Amino acid sequence: MSETRITPEVIAQHQLSTSEYQKILTLLGREPTLTELGIFGVMWSEHCSYKSSRIHLKKLPTESKRVLQGPGENAGIVDIGDGMAIAFKIESHNHPSFIEPFQGAATGVGGILRDIFTMGARPIAVMDSIRFGRPDDETTGARNRRLLEGVVSGIAHYGNCFGVPTVGGECVFEESYDGNPLVNVFALGVFRHDEVFYGKASGVGNPVIYVGAKTGRDGIHGASMASAEFTESSKQKRPNVQVGDPFTEKLLLEACLEAMRTGAIVGIQDMGAAGLTSSTCEMGSRAGTGVEIELSLVPQREAGMTPYEMMLSESQERMLLVAERGREDVVFGVFKKWGLDAVEIGRVTADGMLRVKQNGIVFAEIPNRALADEAPKYDRPRTRPLRTAPLNGPAVRRGNWGADLKTLLASGDVCSKRWIYEQYDHQVRTNTVAGPGAEAAVVRIKGTDTSIAMSLDGNGRYCALDPREGTKLLVAECCRNLSTVGALPIATTNNLNFGNPERPEIMAQIVESIEGLAEACRFFDVPVTGGNVSLYNETLGTPIFPTPVVGIVGTLPTSLPIGISFAKIGLRVLLLGGLGTADARELGGTQYAKVIHKSLWGVPPQLDMEYEKRVQAAIRELVRGGLVASAHDLSKGGLAVALAESSFGPENIGADIKLDSDLPPELLLFHEGPSRILVSTPNPEEVFRVANANGVHAIEIGVTLKARVTISNRGEVLLNERVDELKGLWNNSLEHLLHNSVAV
Amino acid sequence: MKIGVVVFPGSNCDHDAWHAFAETLRQDTVLLWHDSAALQGADLVVLPGGFSYGDYLRCGAIAKFSPVMGAVKKFAQEGGLVLGVCNGFQILTEAGLLPGALVRNAGLKFVCKTVPLEVATTDSPFTHRAVKGQTLALPVAHGEGCYIASEQVLDELEAGDRVAFRYRENPNGSMRNIAGILNRERNVMGLMPHPERAADPLMGGTDGLTIFESVLHAGVAASRA
C-alpha cells in the first residue's frame, strides 16, 4: 500500500492538534496509516466528538419518568402513553447550506430524518429554524436572499418528496448571520415501545450489511469542514457538500421499517457525518464488540476509490445494519423489493476493533472505543461572555405608534412566513391539526387520543445580551407556546449554534447558555433527550450571535385546535399574566429596538420562572376546558403585535383595547416581557377564576369588534388602525423584501 | 365497495387515501403494489399523490410503464372507476387515460394551501352528490400542477361537460382554471387537489368527503343495477 506519509502538515489538514496526535500514537501504540488518521480526524472533530462542549453538556437534565432514551443515541425517545413513543432530534446544516444552500439544506433534512427512522420510528413532522443576514442590505442583501430561496427550496424539495410534513419553525434576519446562515432542522417520529431499534453491533459473527445508495466521493470531510471557521477559500469546499436524493430516502424508510418488522435485524444506524466510519465504530463501541469490513464489497458509484475516501465519504441515503446470522436472506428480500442495494460487507467480531480491509489488505485497525468514546474532551478557558452592546439605549421616543406597529408587522422577523411555508407540504400524512402560523404545531397520533405539540425557538438578540437569561427565556417561550395550545411540555432537544470555542469570550457564551438551558429545563421538567452543537460559526473572525435553538415537545388530548385569531365580535379580551413590567434597558433586545431604533442594548426581558410556570398551568386549564375562544402568547413585538396578529383571522375581527398603566407607550405597546397570554372569551369570569386558582393575574383589557385595532391608555388613544391594512403589510412583506430588488 | 389504493415506489399519500377510505369511511380498502397486475377485485382504484419513482424525469412518466398501470388501463376500459389525485392525475395523463398534461406551476414553486374550487359538473360518479356551482375547499400540494392542453382539447372538455373542478383562485396557472377532469366515459377522474386531506374535521375541513361519498354511492348504484 502506498499511502501518503504522515507529516505535521497532513496532521494539521485533519484539524488534529499535536497533543491529539500524541494521544493517537498512545492509543494505537504505533504511527497511524493515512486512512486511520482520516478516521480519527472525523471522529475526533468538534462535529462528531463534542470535544469542547461535552463536559458542559453533562450539566443538562436528561431524565424523567417519560424519557425512554436520553442523549447518546441517534435520537431521544419519550413515552407518550398507550404503549406509544416519539423519537425526535434537531441537527444543524449551517456550513453546507452556506456553501450550497439548496443541497446543504436538503441533506440536512435527509440526515435528521434518517436519525429518526434508524430508531424504528416513522417520521411524522419536521420543523426548521433558519437564520440569514438582512435581505435588504445593500452589499450582502442579494446573497442573503439567494441563500434564503435556496435553503427553503432545498427543505421543500426533500421533505415534500419524502412525504413528511414541515409543520412549523422560525425564520430570522439579522446582520449577525450575514456571513454565516443557520439552518437547523428538527424531526419527530412515532412508534410503539416494542418497535425501538438501537445502533448496536451485537452478536459476534453476525453479518454487517450495507443498505441504500452507493458510495461516492461526495461529502468527504464534511464533519471537519463543519468544525472550522469560514475563510475566503471556503467556496472551494463546494465538493464537500453532499447531494440528496429524497426518493431513495423514502424507499430506505419503507424498506428499513419493513425489515425491522421481520425480527431479523439486531442493530441499525444511519451513515451520517463520516459515513461508514461513524456507523461502524459507534455501533461496535455501544455493543462492546469489533466490526470488520471489506471495502471491495461496498456498492460504489465510481471506480478507484481509496479506503481513505470510502471511509470518509458522506454520500447520503445509506444505512448500516447488523442482522441475525442465518436470517440475512429475509433482510435482503425486503431491500430487493424496494429496489435498494443490500450487501454483506463484514461481520461483528469479539476483539473490539474496527478493522477496515480492501481486497484483503488491512488499511485501518483501531479500537472502536478509542474512536467513539476516547475522543479528547476540553475544558477550554473562558472569560466573560463576548458582549458589544451598550447597557443603555437611546432616549425614549414620542413616536407615531400606529406607524411603528406597521413597520414592525412588515419587518422580516415579525411578518407572516407564508411565502416560506406555502412551499412546504405541511399536511401530508393527514395528521396536521395545527400547522405553520399556529402558536405551536400540533400533529395527532392516529390510533390514539393523543396529539403531539411542538415548538422551535431561538433568540440571538436576547442571548447576545445575556446568554444565560436568553436561553432560559427560550425554554420558557417554547413551553408557553405548547401550553397555549393546551399541551403539557415533556421533553427538549437543542441546537447550540456558537462561534469559535477556542476564544475564551465565546466559550463563556457557550457555558452560560448551557447552564441556563440546564436550569430552565430542570425547572420546567422538560429533560434534554439529545441535540446538536454547531461551533465555529464565524466568517472572517466575526462570530454569530450566540444562538441556541430549543425544540420542545408536549402532549395533549386530540381535539379541534384553539386558534390565535379572534373568532367573533363582542368577545371580551383579557391578558392572562397581566401587563408585565419593563424598563428602558429591557426594551433593548426587543423587535422594537431592532426595527424602530435599529439598535441593540440593555438586558433581555426579566423572567420569573415560578410565575411563568403558573401562567402556563392556567392557560392549559383554560384551553383544555374550552373556556377561551382564542389564545396567543406575547412574544416578538409585545402586546401591540400580538393584538394585531390576533385580528388576522378570515373575518378581520379586531379589538378595542383600553389600558390603565404607568408604563410609557413604547414599553406598554412593545415590551416583550414573558408570562403573558392574550385570550378572548365570552366568559371573563371563568378566566379570572382559573387565573386566581393558579395564583396569576388576569386583566380585562377590551372587547373584539369589526375591522379595527385601537389601543388607548388612560383615555389617550395610542393607535387606531384598520385591520385589513395591517394584515396586508404583515401578509405580503416577506415577498416584497425578497423580490422588490428584482421587480420592475 | 372495495377500494384499491396503488402504491408506487415514492407514493406518499397512499396511506392518507387508505386512511380516509378504510378508517373514516369504513370501506374494505387494500393497497395494490405497483409490481403486480392484480387489482384484487377493487371496484374503485385510487392513484394517490406522491413522487412515483422519484419523478425525476417527468411526473408520472415512469409510473405509466408499471405492471399495475397495465391492469388499471384495462380496468378503466371495462368501465371501472379510477380516481387519480395529484401525482395520480399526472400519471393518468401520462398513461393517456386523460387528455392534456400537468407542468411546472406558473409561480415555479411548490404550493401547499387550501383553495376554493367550483364544482363544474355533477354528472359523474365522483361529483353527483355535490351541487353544480358549489364551492369546495380542498388543499393543494404540488410543484407541477399547471394543467395544459391544446385549445381543441380544452374546448372538447368543456363541450363534453368533462371539467369536474375549476379553481376559484388559480394557484398554479392552469388553463381555464381547470383543477380536475373526466374521461369521455366519465369513469376516470383526475384532480390536483387532495380530497383525502379534507376528510376529517381535525384537518380543518370535510369537503373532500363530498367526492368520496359520491363514489361510494355510485358504486352502490352500479352494483344494484
Image: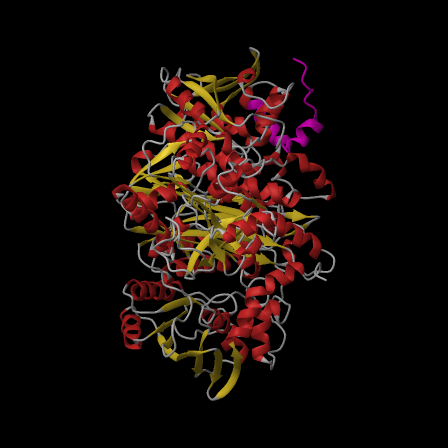
Magenta stretch: includes residue A13 = yes
Quadrant of res A289: top left
Quadrant of res B22: top left
Q: Is residue B31 above or below residue A341?
A: below
Q: Decide if residue A559 is in sight here.
A: yes
Q: Give A436 or A459, whichever is nearer the viewer.
A: A436
Q: Is residue A488 above or below residue A43?
A: below
Direction from residue A205 to residue A404 in the image, left or right: right
Q: Read off the magenta span.
A: A1-26
Residue A149, how many percent across, how many down?
A: 62, 51
Residue B70, how many percent across, how many down?
A: 45, 30
Direction from residue A559 to residue A428 in the image, left or right: right
Residue B4, how many percent across, how many down?
A: 35, 37
Q: Quadrant of the C terminus of chain B?
A: top left
Direction from residue A130 to residue A282 in the image, left or right: left
Residue A198, how many percent across, how many down?
A: 39, 31
* Residue at x 45%, y 82% (from the top left corner): A661
Q: Is residue A175 above or below residue A574?
A: above
Magenta stretch: includes residue B175 = no
